[in-house]
Each structure stands twice: as structure tokens, then as C-alpha cells.
């Protein structure tokens, strides 16, 4: 069946058949190793202390120039649980990750056993991560008002006191830790708050447990709670409940920080106008980014010099081109790394989906390359599945299929964790902006501001610390390839190239003492005087979005890689597709054909498209009646989204219709808006 019908056919059929093949058993356990009764609250009381101090001074070098400088110091205690209900991995996961990277380049795996031990101040043990004592933040700024008494300087700067030039630089440290501890405490504190997932791929269509009642959980899906105290080893091996998704902690995290700098020129203009032109920059460093520390290794074959991702890509490209298996030449990587696969071929499970499989003789004996090609071709765009077949005994057959590598089982995958997520200082970002501001102080009853920003924001991912891989699934904000975390570096989710906004307050010149009807009597003035009109308008260029995939796992076991634009960039915006629905693309079917699935080792593309921006005008009209100096009655009429403009929101597309597997009839159709329908409100207020 065509993969596009997976959502519309496969999943409904699975639901109708009552197949239950995946489960999570959740347990809360005390630090003594005793399981809490079902329904009992798992109490946690986290505490942290923060210390900050600064020194600052200013130096007036000349009557026109002032220099300000200072130094700030920040010390953040890693959060700890006050009753000692806190655990950490028994080894440094930062070292674990770095050693895995070194091992794969050396041509082998690295799988030291990981246990969980009591940690934290209340247990007299080390904290989640080490204190960072180096958070020293210098600041420097200047302000110069050119004297500009005559000549060119006077024409440029308007004379003494009419202009100012300012600049500054500083380092700013983030306050972090609470979100990390919250994710780890809920999802990663194995032995305390323990989530045990049943083994991935354990059941087939015939052996899967079936739904029998709303409150009935098939017993084979329920894992027994962990027993005993600490240290507590995480389960190892597929048969023992290992090779599952979990959370860890990077014990060597440092405080994220940013370099911030600005330069601005202000100039006073006639008629009470002021012009400001400014450059703003921010460079984020050591930013928190969640990575999979147990991601499959990209092992290098030292004999041929080829790495796994390159070898798997060759198989995927051959399968996409429908190359017959009997025509596929040997690839050194597979011949060298998987010599035991030669001669192994399963025509029952893979014959119908293997290119050329229908014409193979009964005694077909494949090369190692051809044997691996059969499983990869049958799982095109989901290449981590045939890899786990060949590396984790029991995932498909009793042993590895078609064979383990020459390194043995669990060379690529970790026997305890198929994925092990942890926040690390892997992120960087940059923001550069030109800002132009025109301000007019209250003059003749009018106060008005106009602002324009031209900017560019880039990062690896835009998720906040409180949002983990579960919360941001299908959002392309998680690192897909831990061995190349910058692959998804691109425009930030909130990147907005152009922004215009303006606001105003205008006392209408009508009524006693005003330009019009200035001599009106008390009763007439009570009707036409003291009216005020105010408003706010904003327009932006388009916001970025990503074309996601729902079933493409070529690189990471848990996280799908996004789609890659392989054809001409399609026209985007807000269009009505043939079925009458609003759509990101002018021609959704043609646009869908311009994208391809990621290959092994690729993370995809992020935020390469732009949808609609924002437009909105809010306005208000008010009238006041001052009875005495202390008593005022005020009527107001406020309208939000005056023009009733509709602007569609691209942010929700990656999790819904903006997935490559969607049928062309619904591909990238909008399901939410940035704007709300026009709203009016009236108020009458008496102040005394």
C-alpha cells in the first residue's frame, strides 16, 4: 500500500483490530527502593540558590562624552532535591558521548554500563552538574553628544545637544536549570520516577496483544517495577527490557551566555520629532540544545575508509532508483563490516518489497551487500529499522538479521538505550538587526511613534529549556544527528525579516479651547469636546516553517528527519487550493513533488519556507466628562483587529498537514490563524 495512506488506512485498521503493541509502565519509587502505591503523590521539593553582584562606574571624559563600565558576577547553584530523592547516572554522560564519538571514528563501538546512583547535596553526593564559577560579565558603554556648533557637523547633528551617539557591549548569562531538572525528574530518574517502555518491534500483527476493555491493560504490556535500592543499573539488552528511550544529564554543563552589542544615533528634528537609527546584535553561546547521547554510531570501516552513513546512503539511493538486487555491486563497507550476511536472504518477509526479488531463483545466495540491501530497500526512508535488525538480537529474529557486524551485537546501538536525551551546551545563535524609530512627542494634541526593524535570527533550535523532545515532537527544533548538531542551523522559529509598527494618541481638536468649535457652551462641549482617538498597527513579513515527515527515520531512531527541498522553491503564502481550503502553497501537489526524504546521516532542512506574516490594527475612541477636579466619567469604545484581517499561522503545520506523507489534497492546508476575529468592547468608567 502506498505510504501516503498510512494515516488514512494503516492506523485506522490497527485501531479497529485492537492492536496494542506499545506501552509505558510508570512507577514512582522512594530512594530506599520501595514502590509508591498507585495514586500516591510523588513529592519533590527542589531548591536552588543564586548569587549576583556587580560594580559599576562612569567617567565623564569631556562635557560631551560619558563612558560607563562595570562588571557583573553570577553564581548559580545546581538545583537539588531537599529530601535526597534524587539520582544521577553513575558515569559522566559527557565523557560517555565523547568516547562514543571517538570509538566510531576508530571503527568500533563503546558501551560502558550505566547505572543510577543517589546524588545531590541532601545525600552528601555531587550535584546534577558541577558549579560554574566563571560567570564573569563585563559591560562597557559610551554616550557622546557632538558639540556641532558650526559647519558640516552642525548640519549633520543639528547643533549642540541635538544629537547623541551611543554604543555598548556586554556579556549576559542565562538563569537555567529548572526546566532541565523537571524533564529529568519526570522522565529520566530511573529507579525513582521510572518509565519502562516495552521493547520496540517486539510484536507482529499476529502476536500483538488486543484491546479487551477500556480499563483492561494486557498483562504482557506491563513491566514489573524496578526492585532494590541504589545503585540501580538500567536494563540492558532487548530481552531484558533495555534498548529503550530515556533521559540523561550532561554533568559538565556550563552557564549559557550571550555577547550583546549595540550602536545608535539619535537626532532631534524640527516639529518635536526625534529620529533614532540603531544596530543591535546578539551572539548566543553555549546555548542549551537537547541531543541524543545514545544515537546509533556512524562507525567507520577502517579497511575501506567508508563510514556507515555513506554506505547506508548508497543502499537508499539504489532502492529509490529501483535497482534490482541481483544487479547491485558489492559495497566494501558491507562486505567488510557484515561478512556474515553473505548468503542470507528472507524471501518470505522481504521478497515482495526487494527490487528484483520476484525474479530471483530459489537458490539465490546474495553477497553481504545484497543481503543488507534487501532489508534497507524494504524500509526505505526508515533506515534505522534495518540497522537495529542487524545490530540488536531479537528485534527481528532470534539473533541479528541478516547478521551482526564483525564487531558483534550492539556495535551501533547502545544495549541500554535506543535513545538517551540530555540537554547540552551544543547550541549557538546570532541576531542582527537594523532599527529605525521616529517619535513625536505630544504636540498640538498628537503623540506618534513609528518603528521599523530589519533583522535576521539564526539558531540550531528555538525550543525553550522547558520543552523537551516529547513536547516538541515534529517541530524540527531537536538535534536529529548528534554527530553533526549544526545540520539544522537556520532561521529561528520567530525570525521576522521586516517589522513595521506604529502607535498614536490624538486629542481631537474639537470643543472649548480647541481649533474647532472653540467657543462652544458647556452643553455643546459636553457632546463634542474631550474626544481622544488612539491606535496601534503592526505588519510583519512572513514567518518561517518546515516541511516535516511522519515516517522517515533515516538517521535517528526516535526523531524523524525533516524533508529536503530538492526542486525549485515553491511559491508560498496564503492561497485557496482546489478543494477550497487555505493552503501554504499555490500549487500543493507540485510543491509536494519538490521535496524529498532525508538520507541516512541527514537531518533535513529547517525553516526554509515562509508563510504569511502578521497584520493587525487596534483602535480606540474615548470621551471624558470632568465634573470636578476629582470626579471624571469616561466612555470608551475599543476595536481589536479593525479590518477583520485574517492571517494564517504556519507554526502548527509541521505537526499536522505540513508533513510530506500527507495526501496532496490536504498537504500544507492551514488549521489555525495568527489573528482573531474583530472584537469590540464598550466601557463606562467613573473615577473619583
Image (cartoon, rainbow, N blue to C red):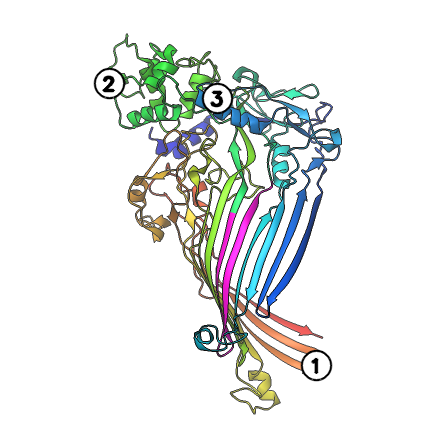
Side of 608 relative to 186 (left or right): left
Read off the magenta span.
255-283
Task: Report the residue that reaches farthest toward the top.
Answer: 363
Query: Foreground: 429 or 228?
Result: 429
In this rendering, the answer to whether 650 lies above or below 524 is above
Q: Is mark 3 on a helix, strand or loop?
A: helix
Say the numbered circle drawn on residue 629: 1
Total label count?
3
Quadrant in which the C terminus is drawn: bottom right
Q: Which residue is drawn at 47% across and 66% down?
A: 642
Say if the magenta span includes residue 272.
yes
Evaluate whether residue 3 shows in this view: yes
Q: Position of residue 347 (x, y in %)?
A: 33, 14
Mark 3 = which residue?
Answer: 103
Q: Is residue 533 above or below residue 121?
A: below
**Closer to the camera: disc 3 or disc 2?**
3
Q: What's the distance in space between the residues labelled 3 and 2, CA to CA?
A: 34 Å
In depth, the one of 650 and 367 nearer the eye is 367
Other residues around mark 1 within 10 Å, as few (<14) / some (14–19) / many (≥20): few
Q: Earlier in the sequence, mark 3 or mark 1?
A: 3
Name the residue located 52 percent from the left edge and 46 percent from the top edge.
284
Q: Is the magenta stretch mostly helix, strand or loop?
A: strand
Residue at (34% x, 53% y) in the render: 575
Q: Residue 327 carries which label?
A: 2
Pointer 2 with pointer 1, Cβ within 8 A = no
Front position in the image: 233 or 626: 233
Amino acid at each position: 500500500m502506498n505510504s501516503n495512506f498510512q494515516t488514512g488506512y494503516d492506523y485506522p485498521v490497527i485501531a479497529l483490530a485492537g492492536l496494542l503493541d506499545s506501552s509505558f509502565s510508570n512507577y514512582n519509587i522512594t530512594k530506599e527502593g520501595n514502590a509508591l502505591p498507585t495514586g500516591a503523590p510523588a513529592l519533590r521539593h527542589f531548591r536552588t540558590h543564586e548569587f549576583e553582584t556587580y560594580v559599576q562606574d562612569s567617567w565623564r571624559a569631556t562635557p560631551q562624552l560619558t563612558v560607563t563600565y562595570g562588571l557583573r558576577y553570577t553564581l548559580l547553584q545546581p538545583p537539588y532535591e531537599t529530601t535526597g530523592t534524587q539520582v544521577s547516572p553513575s558515569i559522566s554522560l559527557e565523557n560517555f558521548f565523547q568516547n562514543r564519538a571517538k570509538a566510531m571514528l576508530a571503527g568500533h563501538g563503546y558501551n560502558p554500563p550505566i547505572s543510577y546512583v543517589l546524588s545531590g547535596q541532601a545525600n552528601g553526593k555531587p550535584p546534577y552538574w558541577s558549579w560554574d564559577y566563571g560567570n564573569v560579565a563585563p559591560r562597557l558603554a559610551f554616550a557622546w553628544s557632538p558639540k556641532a556648533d558650526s559647519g558640516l557637523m552642525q548640519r549633520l547633528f543639528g547643533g549642540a545637544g541635538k544629537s547623541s551617539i551611543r554604543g555598548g557591549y556586554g556579556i549576559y548569562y542565562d538563569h537555567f536549570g529548572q526546566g532541565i531538572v523537571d524533564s529529568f525528574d519526570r522522565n529520566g530518574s530511573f529507579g525513582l520516577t521510572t518509565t519502562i517502555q516495552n521493547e520496540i518491534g517486539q510484536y507482529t500483527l499476529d502476536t500483538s496483544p488486543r484491546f479487551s476493555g477500556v480499563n483492561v491493560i494486557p498483562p504482557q504490556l506491563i513491566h514489573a517495577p524496578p526492585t532494590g535500592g541504589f545503585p540501580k543499573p538500567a536494563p540492558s539488552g532487548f530481552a531484558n527490557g533495555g534498548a529503550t528511550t530515556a533521559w540523561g544529564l550532561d554533568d559538565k554543563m556550563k552557564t549559557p551566555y550571550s555577547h550583546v552589542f549595540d550602536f545608535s544615533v539619535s537626532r532631534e528634528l524640527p516639529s518635536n520629532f526625534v529620529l533614532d537609527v540603531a544596530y543591535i546584535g546578539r551572539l548566543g553561546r553555549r546555548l542549551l540544545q537537547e541531543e541524543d547521547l545514545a544515537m546509533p554510531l556512524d562507525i567507520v570501516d577502517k579497511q575501506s575508509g567508508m563510514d556507515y552513513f555513506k554506505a547506508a546512503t548508497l543502499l537508499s539511493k539504489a532502492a529509490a532508483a529501483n535497482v534490482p538486487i541481483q544487479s547491485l555491486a558489492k559495497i566494501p563497507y558491507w562486505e567488510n563490516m557484515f561478512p556474515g550476511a553473505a548468503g542470507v536472504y528472507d524471501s518470505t518477509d522481504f521478497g515482495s518489497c526487494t527490487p528484483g526479488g520476484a525474479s530471483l531463483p530459489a537458490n539465490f545466495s546474495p553477497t553481504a551487500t545484497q543481503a543488507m540491501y534487501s532489508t534497507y530497500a524494504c524500509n526505505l526512508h526508515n533506515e534505522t529499522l534495518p540497522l537495529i535488525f542487524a545490530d540488536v538480537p531479537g528485534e527481528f529474529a532470534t539473533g541479528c538479521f541478516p547478521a551482526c557486524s564483525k564487531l558483534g551485537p550492539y556495535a551501533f546501538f547502545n544495549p541500554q538505550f535506543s535513545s538517551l536525551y540530555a540537554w547540552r551546551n551544543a547550541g549557538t545563535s546570532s541576531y542582527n538587526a537594523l532599527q529605525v524609530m521616529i517619535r513625536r512627542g505630544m504636540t498640538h494634541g498628537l503623540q506618534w511613534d513609528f518603528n521599523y526593524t530589519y533583522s535576521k535570527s539564526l539558531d540550531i533550535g528555538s525550543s525553550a529549556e522547558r520543552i523537551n523532545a516529547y513536547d516538541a515532537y515534529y517541530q524540527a527544533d531537536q538535534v536529529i544527528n548528534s554527530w553533526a548538531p549544526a545540520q539544522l542551523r537556520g532561521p529561528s522559529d520567530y525570525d521576522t525579516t521586516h517589522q513595521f509598527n506604529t502607535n498614536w494618541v490624538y486629542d481631537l481638536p474639537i470643543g472649548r479651547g480647541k481649533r474647532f468649535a472653540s467657543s462652544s457652551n458647556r452643553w455643546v462641549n459636553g457632546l463634542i469636546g474631550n474626544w481622544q482617538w488612539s491606535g496601534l498597527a503592526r505588519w510583519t513579513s512572513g514567518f518561517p516553517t518546515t516541511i516535516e515527515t511522519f515516517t522517515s527515520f533515516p538517521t535517528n531512531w526516535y526523531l524523524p528527519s525533516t524533508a529536503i527541498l530538492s526542486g525549485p522553491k515553491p511559491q508560498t503564502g496564503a492561497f485557496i487550493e482546489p478543494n477550497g481550503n487555505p493552503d501554504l502553497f499555490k500549487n500543493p501537489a507540485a510543491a509536494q513533488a519538490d521535496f524529498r526524504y532525508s538520507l541516512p546521516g541527514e537531518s533535513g532542512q529547517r525553516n526554509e519556507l515562509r508563510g504569511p506574516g502578521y497584520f493587525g490594527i487596534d483602535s480606540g475612541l474615548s470621551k471624558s466628562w470632568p465634573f470636578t477636579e476629582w470626579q471624571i466619567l469616561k466612555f470608551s469604545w475599543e476595536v481589536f483587529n479593525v479590518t477583520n484581517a485574517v492571517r494564517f499561522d504556519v507554526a502548527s503545520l509541521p505537526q499536522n498537514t505540513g508533513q510530506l506523507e500527507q495526501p496532496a489534497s490536504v498537504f500544507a492546508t492551514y488549521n489555525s490563524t495568527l489573528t482573531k476575529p474583530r472584537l469590540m468592547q464598550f466601557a463606562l468608567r467613573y473615577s473619583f
